[in-house]
Image: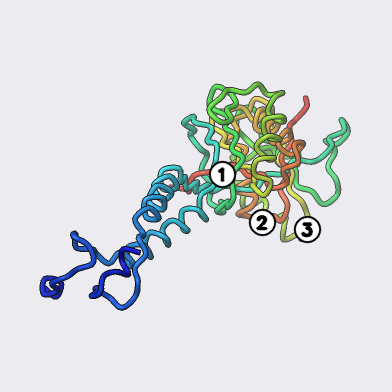
């Protein structure tokens, strides 16, 4: 109303007062900037079998059993003991022999979780398609 | 310069053209609205294990931490092992599309890692990952 009475307006278009809009927008912007949390998590997938009956510790035909012992070494198929950081070639060799094989990482309950993750990582690095993590129940 | 020559301006104060400012502010606002996910951090310092095959986990909204003393933390609270499932179900209800990330300390026991992963899976979360650091 007041604006229209000006005979010589600065621009040809009628200007809307955007100050309250800007106030609200700035407040929302500040709120979202402050609450923004950018979680950049990197991780490896972990799967656990649905059911572990007590007699499941026997090796199903195309499976590689990597048993992580309490002392930090890995027992491969209950026959030999290797270092966790050298499981990758073992898994590679197994996957070349059994392309549909699964890798079962069986960790002792009081072994270090970091080593279990290392073994799973090595198994994935050795082109393993499916890696499962279980607990030894002995 | 041009303004000064106008003898009758619309109001007493000189007005600045705020349209480009508003454009930028709106774009920033939309960006932050879209990218904001309200993640409840466990709030403990975790010495993550190193892994080379780790992949970026997007939409990770359910975070469970296990520290070096085998204590389990969700949303800055220590949680007993049996209560993990209920807490994760609550977090899942708040953010149904989110995936779960278990932040486990490298010195924690494997028992807790497997038990927590089992409970998270029982809570109905299909995509579970273990948080790792890139290999240095």
Q: Residues within 10 Å of mark 2 (few under 14, many from 20)?
A: some
Callout 3: helix, strand or loop? loop
* Colouring rule applied to residues: rainbow
| Image quadrant in which you'd find residue B38 | top right
- Along the horizontal axis of the image, is A92 left or right of B3? right
Parent chain of label 2: A
- Along the horizontal axis of the image, is A50 left or right of B73? right
Numbered tag placed on residue A98 in the rendering: 3
Parent chain of label 3: A
Residue drawn at x 37%, y 55% is A22
In the rendered image of this protein, does residue A86 appear above or below residue A112? below
In the rendered image of this protein, does residue B53 appear above or below residue B115? below
Task: Estimate the x, y position of residue A14 in percent, counting from the top left.
Answer: 35, 71
Residue drawn at x 67%, y 52% is A91
Callout 2: helix, strand or loop? helix
Quickly name the residue at label 1.
A85
Residue sitting nearer the eye, A57 or A94:
A57
Numbered tag placed on residue A92 in the rendering: 2
Q: Are marks 2 and 1 on the same chain?
A: yes
Q: Residues within 10 Å of mark 1 (few under 14, many from 20)?
A: some
CA gap, disc 1 and disc 3: 22 Å
Residue drawn at x 69%, y 37% is A75
Parent chain of label 1: A
Task: Estimate the x, y position of residue B73 in percent, counting from the top left.
Answer: 57, 27
- Label 2 vs 3, first from the N-terminus: 2
CA gap, disc 2 and disc 1: 13 Å
């Amino acid at each position: 109303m007041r604006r229209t009475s000006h005979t010589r307006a600065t621009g040809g278009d009628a200007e809307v007062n955007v100050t309250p809009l800007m106030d609200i927008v700035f407040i929302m912007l500040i709120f979202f900037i402050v609450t923004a949390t950018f979680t950049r998590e990197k991780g490896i997938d972990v799967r656990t079998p649905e059911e572990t009956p007590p007699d499941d510790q026997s090796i199903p035909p195309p499976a590689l059993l990597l048993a992580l012992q309490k002392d930090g070494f890995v027992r491969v198929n209950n026959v030999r003991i290797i270092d966790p950081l050298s499981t990758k070639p073992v898994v590679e060799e197994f996957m070349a022999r059994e392309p549909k094989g699964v890798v079962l990482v069986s960790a002792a309950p009081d072994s270090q979780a970091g080593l279990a993750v290392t073994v799973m990582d090595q198994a994935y690095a050795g082109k393993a398609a499916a890696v499962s993590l279980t607990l030894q129940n002995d | 310069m041009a303004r000064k020559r106008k003898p009758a301006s619309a109001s007493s104060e000189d007005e600045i053209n705020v349209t480009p400012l508003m454009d930028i502010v709106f774009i920033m606002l939309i960006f932050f609205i879209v990218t904001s996910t309200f993640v409840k951090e466990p709030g403990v310092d975790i010495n993550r294990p190193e892994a080379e095959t780790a992949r970026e986990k997007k939409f990770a909204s359910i975070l469970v931490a296990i520290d070096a003393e085998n204590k389990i933390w969700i949303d800055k609270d220590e949680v007993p092992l049996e209560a993990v499932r209920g807490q994760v179900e609550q977090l899942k209800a708040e953010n149904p599309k989110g995936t779960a990330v278990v932040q486990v300390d490298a010195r924690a026991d494997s028992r807790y890692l497997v038990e927590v992963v089992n409970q998270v899976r029982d809570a109905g979360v299909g995509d579970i990952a273990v948080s790792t650091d890139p290999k240095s």
